[in-house]
Amino acid sequence: MVRIKDVAKEAGVAASTVSLVMNKKGYVSESTRQKVEAAMKKLKYVPSEVARNLSLSRTNTIGVIMPSVSHPFFGEVIEALEAALYDQNCKMMLCCTQHKENGERTFVDMLKRRTMDGIIMGAHSLDVSLYADVQQPIVAFDRYLNDRIPIVHCNHKKGGQLAAERFLAHGCKHIVEVIGYQGVQTPANEYHFNAADILHAHGVRVDVVEMPWNAFDYPSFAAAAQQLFQQYPDVDGVLGADLAIAACLHVAAAMGRRVPDDLRLLAYDGTAVTRMGLEPITAVRQPIRELAELSVRKVLQMVNGTCEDGPWVIDPFILDGNTC
């Protein structure tokens, strides 16, 4: 195997000069650079990425912490993050926390040991003290961790407004919101709160069904849908995440409820789940690809020490369907 000292011997320079040429770091004359590059080509030398990254104090790896890869929203986020990192010549190391007791702590420890350059954190962990003393680059994805760590998120207040306006346009009188566990501090709660405030101001009744913590699977949402229709039989509009609304659509059909004639269903996220059934589900769409690209851009700016202020928020939009 060709080594860096073999290239140096062929080019008639010091090994440190070859290193400067490969890393594009420090001054090397043009004639010397050409000799080194010619030697590398002649010997078919392939630089060691590990050694190069060590010399630059970089791993070109970003850790991504999310609750679940099987949940439609987080699955699409993870895919978009991987693509955005790839475009920046970076690799993604993924940790899904739903069934891993110490996975998140392991990732943070790896960041502290500089095994990765930064972390994009979007898990729904309840104990965020883990991040209190971390000095390395971290961007929170739709999570509040502490006052030092910036958050990239959708404009959920705008999303709540879009949802409320759609229900009001159809004359709904009783809305039930299926909300995530409120022990998790996330900007996403704003869409529920703002939608409820607007609907209340127009005399609309709003009730809530709260999901258990870390409940991201379809059976959990199906159980919540059953509870919703039993507890609020006069409901005429439901707002919730894509899987919650997909479950409500199935339960409503089994009960003989007519959608959208006497029941309006509006999903929040707008993932592929809302486009898969016989009835496309109306949704407030989070711009997942743009949010992922913004998260990657921000964390890499932090890694390079060039992070700029804002914007950290992107507006959602309505995806029309047949349910609201």
Image (cartoon, rainbow, N blue to C red):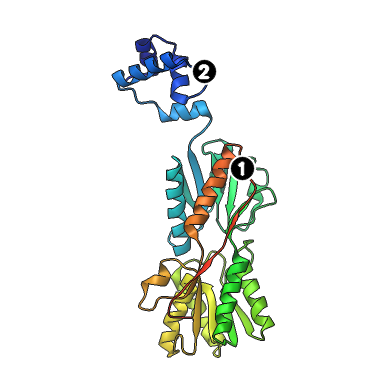
Left or right? Give the position of 319 relative to 196.
Answer: left
Question: Earlier along the polypeptide chain: callout 2 or callout 1?
Answer: 2
Residue 119, image x, y percentages: 55, 46
Label 1 crowd (10 A; few <14 / some 14-19 / many >=20): few
Q: With 5 as the anchor, is 225 left or right in this view?
A: right
Q: Residue furthest front?
A: 30
The quarter of the displayed image where residue 187 is located: bottom right
Residue 66 coordinates in the image, percent (x, y): 51, 55
Q: Is residue 57 above or below residue 156?
A: above
The tag on residue 27 is 2
Q: Considering only vertical position in the picture, is 12 above or below 65? A: above
Identity of the residue drawn at 57% across and 87% down: 171
**Residue 109 pos. (x, y %):** 57, 41
Can you tell which mark lies on residue 3?
Answer: none
Quarter of image, res 178: bottom right
69 or 241: which is nearer to us? 241
| Residue on which the image places disc 1 | 307
Q: Amino acid at mark 1?
A: Cys
Give the residue displayed 58% in from the left and 78% down from the top: 165
Asked which secondary structure carries label 2, the reply is: loop
Q: Nearer the viewer, mark 2 or mark 1?
A: 2
> How many numbered circles are shown?
2
User: Residue at (34%, 16%) from the top-left corner?
Assistant: 39
**Can residue 100 be seen in the rendering of this structure?**
no
